[in-house]
């Protein structure tokens, strides 16, 4: 029974770590194109900052921030599952 719990926690760690990596990857490539770029290629257009590649800066930063938060939650859960695995190991070591 305890070994099944440890296996389940190990699988959870792998899955949670993979989810964390996926969200961090998505955050690193997330871009929101500017809806109406300035035809004169002026970087400030109304309340927008448009980068050289046509990305709308502020919405892109907001999206990346949201994805980073989600990745951090998955990473924290992966770390928690590692702690639980360590507690199971301690239990197995001292339970005889």
Image: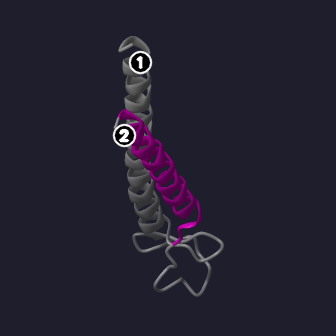
Q: Where is residue 93 drawn, in percent x and y?
A: 44, 15
* 71, 39: nearer the viewer: 71
Which quadrant holds residue 2?
top left
The Cα–Cα distance between marks 2 and 1, rounded to whole angstroms, is 13 Å
In depth, the one of 71 and 5 nearer the eye is 5
Number of marks in the rendered image: 2
Residue 95, position in %: x, y?
35, 15
Dot placed on the residue nearer the N-terminal end, 2 or 1? 2
Say which mark, if any, is on residue 30.
Answer: none
Q: Residue at x 47, y 56 (%)?
A: 19
Left or right for 86, reference 52 = left
Q: Is residue 81 left or right of residue 40?
A: left
Task: Classify mark 1: helix, strand or loop.
Answer: helix
Residue 26 forms part of the magenta stretch? yes
- Secondary structure character of the magenta stretch overall: helix
Q: Quadrant of the N terminus?
A: top left
The answer to whether residue 81 is left or right of residue 30 is left
For the residue pair 62 and 52, the one nearer the viewer reads as 62
Looking at the rendering, the stretch of residues picked out in magenta corresponds to: 2-31
Image-quadrant location for residue 78: top left
Viewer-nearest residue: 62 or 45? 62
Residue 84 within the magenta-colored segment of the rendering: no
Are there few (<14), some (14-19), or many (20+) residues within 10 Å of tag 2?
few
Residue at left offset 45%, top offset 43%: 7
Task: From the viewer's perspective, tell me whether residue 39 is left or right of residue 35.
Answer: right
Q: Which mark is residue 90?
A: 1
- Mark 2 secondary-structure assignment: helix
- For the question of whether residue 75 can be seen, the reply is no
Residue furthest out toward the right: 52
Measuring 54% from the left and 71% from the top, which residue is drawn there?
50
Q: Position of residue 21 (x, y in %)?
A: 54, 53
The residue wearing badge 2 is 5
């Amino acid at each position: 029974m305890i070994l099944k719990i440890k296996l389940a926690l190990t699988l959870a760690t792998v899955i949670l770590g993979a989810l964390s990596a996926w969200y961090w990857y998505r955050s690193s490539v997330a871009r929101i194109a500017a809806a109406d770029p300035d035809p004169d290629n002026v970087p400030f257009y109304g309340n927008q900052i448009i980068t050289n590649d046509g990305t709308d800066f502020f919405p892109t930063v907001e999206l990346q921030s949201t994805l980073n938060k989600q990745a951090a939650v998955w990473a924290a859960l992966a770390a928690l599952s590692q702690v639980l695995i360590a507690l199971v190991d301690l239990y197995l070591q001292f339970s005889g």
